[in-house]
């Protein structure tokens, strides 16, 4: 079976690209572990969080390019994460 096409990011000078930095936010450890394994070397998983509070604490310091957020976290407050981290991530867009 052929591997799916995955474009490789390039920087402006054509040098080795910096991998996309990702934080995974999900309350299921098995899902976070599996997702990390599937993302492989194309992406750099710089952190994981199991709760809204952990995510709000971790994201500003980790400065990811992407946050993969489970919108059905048990606390029911997943929508708070982007709002709380918006200021610290604005420069990453």
Image: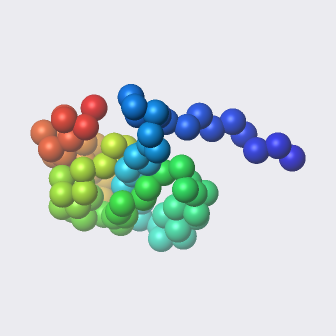
Image: 71 above or below 36: above
Q: Nearer the viewer, residue 68 or 52?
A: 68
Quadrant of the image containing the C terminus = top left
Q: Nearer the viewer, residue 22 or 77?
A: 22
Q: Is residue 21 left or right of residue 34?
A: left
Q: Residue at x 31, y 49 (%)?
A: 64
Residue 6: x, y in percent?
63, 38
Quarter holding residue 54: bottom left
Image: 19 above or below 9: below
Q: Residue at x 41, y 64 (%)?
A: 27
Check the image and name the residue furthest to the right.
Answer: 1
Q: Residue at x 55, y 37 (%)?
A: 8
Check the image and name the residue furthest to the left.
Answer: 87
Kindly tell me whether residue 68 is visible in this rendering.
no
Q: Residue at x 44, y 40 (%)?
A: 15
Q: Nearer the viewer, residue 11 or 68?
A: 11
Image: 47 above or below 43: below
Image: 79 above or below 54: above
Residue 72: x, y in percent?
41, 51
Q: Is residue 72 left or right of residue 38?
A: left
Residue 31: x, y in percent?
53, 63
Q: Is residue 1 left or right of residue 89?
A: right
Q: Nearer the viewer, residue 86 or 1?
A: 1
Q: How is the image coloured?
A: rainbow
């Amino acid at each position: 079976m052929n591997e799916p096409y995955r474009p490789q990011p390039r920087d402006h000078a054509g040098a080795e690209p910096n991998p996309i930095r990702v934080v995974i936010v999900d309350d299921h450890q098995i899902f976070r572990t599996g997702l990390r394994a599937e993302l492989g070397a194309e992406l750099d998983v710089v952190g994981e969080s199991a709760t809204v509070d952990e995510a709000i604490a971790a994201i500003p310091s980790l400065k990811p390019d992407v946050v993969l957020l489970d919108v059905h976290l048990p606390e029911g407050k997943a929508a708070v994460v982007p709002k709380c981290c918006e200021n610290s991530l604005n420069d990453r867009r």
